[in-house]
């Protein structure tokens, strides 16, 4: 029973944060409405874009190369994430993990060479 | 894990896999550093040599007793060996088809990838054949599926190829999700992913009713998910579109190697896990696999009927062969349903026979399709006048697919047919559907023959058969006729070396 209470109390904190999350924007917006003056004019209804008149379509196509770069970045990011715990626990894991890691890194190197040769790293 | 323990493992039993992995890696590096202008066909031949070497090294392990390494995740038992032979020979033929495939529609740019992706797909299938753990089984399945997704869409500039790749990805993703959902229930009930431990736990569990219901859900989920892989009705919808759009060697690969791998995984999971669960709480009850066998039987019957009947209406030969391959999956499911003493033999033999007859047929489809520029059945009109030997070869393969005596297809069907009666109670309905739908299949198979022998040819140009394709054609015809007249070659090989797959669960 004591364990159950402990368990439920943990969720109480979650509930408190949930309430805070809901109340905060409601209170902030409501207070803002109370305090601010209300004087609408034509100019205030126009779309605001960093102080300049908006032009062009809002949907911009950006270069697909960003996506490929991002993909490459994620692969090597994940590799680093894998390498960290291995490096920290190296003494305990022993030689087996070293061999596994070598294979893993080797495979990634082949992938990098592939990307390089297929001109993924080049910005056209 | 210490180094001694690591070296204690008998790594040598993985030699065939290591060879395939090494060759695939080598090909990818060679492809990257070879000059652009150089012909990539040499890579294909290296791949063929690699598969041949792997087959030879596998043959060296035939007398090896059951060995398992890496804590039972990789096991080399007779089941794995027998089915790896089919996978390797099938991939060998498919790779030869790929070498002689015309590199158009943007394929020339990816010619190197085209060869080594077959090898990685084969590697996945081989791992599936000899895995003793759900994790490695699933990794193998994914390696096979992802490689085949890329292969289906490899002709980038061809719209049909793109469409089929998209359909295959979506269907494959859904089926994988359903399979995994089913497997997660089994894992949840047993607490292990090792297949042997799972069957042990489930056997002794006895089981309350609740657990049995969960297991039944797992059974159906896994069956449905893997049925996508086998392209059995009603989960066959993707097959005709994908088969039609994919390059012909890839179509051959899907219908031979991928289907074999599907049956391998289905037998592995169902026989070893659901074959050992008592269907009701009592210890001496029927295993769940036999208890729920009517449902598999229903799938088999529906697959045979739908596959053969819809094939009647097809004008595109690749679509027709897609439906024909759906129907053949139904025949093999009959063997799986009956679960008799001969089931493993019948499945193995049928897959071997199907390999030979189907790969030869696809070789001719590729040849004629490249010449005519379309896969319409009218391209075969007057083939006998233009190339008599080619037409006769195709006729032999088609007769085998239809199951005419004297060919491998007949013996395969006979085995399945007899197996359906070898159990108590016998599966009369399934056996009669098997016969009836075989008769239906004669209509469309013989429709191709009518075109070849009795219709006038549109043009008289001769065929120029590349060496690689010639090897496939000779191999497939010899295999089809030899297994048809002397089926004991295969059965003796099976019985002498694999002892009825007794070590399947050891």
Image (tube, coloured by chain):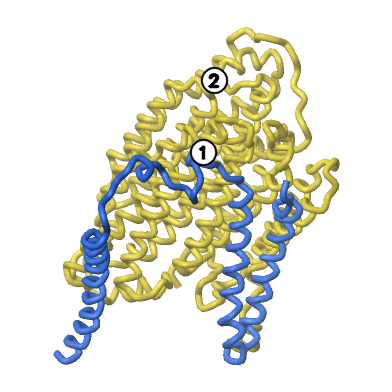
Judging by colour alone, the chain drawn in blue in this rendered image is A
- Taking B306 as reference, is B219 above or below it? below
Dots 2 and 1: beta carbons under 8 Å?
A: no
Q: Residue at x 59, y 9 (%)?
A: B455
Q: Where is residue B270 in the image (x, y as percent from the top left)?
A: 37, 59
Q: Where is residue B258 in the image (x, y as percent from the top left)?
A: 53, 48
Q: Position of residue B463 (x, y in %)?
A: 74, 22
- Taking B397 as reference, is B333 above or below it? below
Judging by colour alone, the chain drawn in yellow in this rendered image is B
- Taking B116 as reference, is B59 above or below it? below
The local crowd at label 2, few if under 14, some if 14 to 19, many if 20 or more residues have their Cα within 10 Å, is: some
Identify the image quadrant of residue B505.
Answer: bottom left
Q: In this view, does B407 lie to the left or right of A30?
A: right
What residue is pinned by disc 1? A55
Question: In the image, which disc is placed on residue B448?
Answer: 2
Task: Please say whether residue B404 is visible from this viewpoint.
Answer: no
Task: Please say whether residue A70 is visible from this viewpoint.
Answer: yes
Same subunit, labels 2 and 1: the answer reads: no
- Taking A101 as reference, is B129 above or below it? above
Camera-side residue: B89 or B210? B210
Camera-side residue: B415 or B238? B238
Camera-side residue: B98 or B184? B184
Q: Which residue is drawn at 27% across and 48% down?
A: B295
């Amino acid at each position: 029973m004591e364990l159950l209470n402990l368990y439920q109390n943990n969720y109480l904190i979650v509930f408190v944060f949930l309430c805070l999350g809901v109340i905060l924007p409601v209170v902030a917006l409501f207070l803002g409405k109370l305090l601010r003056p209300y004087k609408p004019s034509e100019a205030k209804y126009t779309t605001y874009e960093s102080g300049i008149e908006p032009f062009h379509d809002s949907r911009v196509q950006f270069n697909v190369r960003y996506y490929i770069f991002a993909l490459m970045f994620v692969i090597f990011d994940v590799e680093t994430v894998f390498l960290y715990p291995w490096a920290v626990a190296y003494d305990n894991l022993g030689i087996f993990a070293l061999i596994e890691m070598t294979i893993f890194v080797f495979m990634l190197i082949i992938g990098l060479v592939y990307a390089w040769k297929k001109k993924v790293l080049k910005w056209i | 894990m210490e180094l001694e323990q690591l070296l204690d493992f008998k790594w040598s039993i993985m030699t065939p896999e290591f060879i395939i992995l090494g060759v695939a890696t080598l090909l990818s590096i060679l492809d990257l550093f070879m000059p652009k202008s150089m012909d990539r066909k040499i890579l294909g031949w290296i791949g063929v040599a690699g598969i041949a070497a792997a087959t030879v090294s596998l043959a060296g392990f035939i007398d090896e007793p059951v060995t398992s390494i890496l804590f039972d995740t990789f096991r080399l038992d007779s089941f794995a060996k027998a089915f790896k032979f089919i996978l390797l020979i099938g991939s060998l033929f498919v790779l030869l088809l790929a070498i002689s495939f015309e590199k158009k529609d943007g394929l020339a740019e990816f010619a190197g990838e085209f060869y080594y992706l077959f090898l990685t797909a084969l590697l996945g299938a081989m791992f599936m054949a000899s895995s003793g753990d759900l994790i490695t089984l699933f990794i193998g399945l994914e390696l096979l599926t992802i490689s085949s997704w890329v292969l289906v869409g490899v002709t980038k500039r061809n719209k049909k190829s793109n469409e089929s790749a998209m359909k295959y990805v979506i269907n494959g993703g859904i089926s994988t999700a359903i399979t995994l959902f089913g497997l997660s229930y089994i894992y949840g009930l047993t607490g292990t992913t090792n297949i042997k431990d799972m069957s042990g736990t489930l056997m002794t569990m006895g089981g309350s009713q609740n657990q049995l219901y969960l297991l039944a859900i797992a059974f159906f989920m896994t069956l449905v998910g893997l049925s996508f892989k086998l392209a059995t009705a009603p989960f066959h919808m993707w097959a005709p579109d994908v088969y039609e759009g994919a390059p012909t060697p890839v179509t051959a690969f899907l219908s031979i190697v991928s289907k074999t791998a599907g049956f391998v995984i289905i037998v592995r999971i169902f026989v070893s896990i659901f074959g050992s669960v008592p269907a009701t709480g009592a210890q001496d009850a029927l295993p769940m696999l036999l208890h729920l066998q009517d449902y598999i039987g229903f799938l088999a019957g529906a697959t045979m009927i739908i596959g053969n009947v819809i094939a009647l209406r097809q004008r595109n030969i690749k679509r027709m062969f897609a439906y024909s391959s759906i129907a053949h999956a139904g025949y093999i499911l009959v063997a799986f349903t009956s679960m008799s003493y001969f089931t493993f033999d019948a499945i193995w033999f049928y897959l071997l026979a199907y390999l030979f007859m189907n790969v030869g047929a696809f070789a001719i489809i590729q040849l004629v399709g490249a010449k005519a520029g379309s896969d319409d059945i009218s391209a075969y009109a007057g083939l006998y006048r233009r190339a008599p030997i080619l037409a006769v070869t195709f006729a032999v393969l088609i007769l085998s697919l239809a199951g005419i005596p004297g060919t491998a297809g007949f013996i395969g069907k006979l085995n399945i047919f007899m197996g359906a009666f070898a159990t108590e109670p016998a599966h009369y309905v399934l056996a009669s559907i098997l016969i009836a739908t075989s008769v239906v299949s004669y209509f469309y198979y013989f429709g191709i023959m009518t075109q070849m022998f009795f219709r006038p040819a549109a043009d008289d140009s001769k065929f120029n058969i590349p060496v690689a394709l010639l090897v496939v054609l000779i191999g497939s015809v010899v295999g089809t006729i030899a297994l048809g007249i002397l089926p004991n070659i295969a059965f003796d090989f099976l019985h002498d070396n694999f002892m009825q797959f007794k070590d399947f669960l050891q």
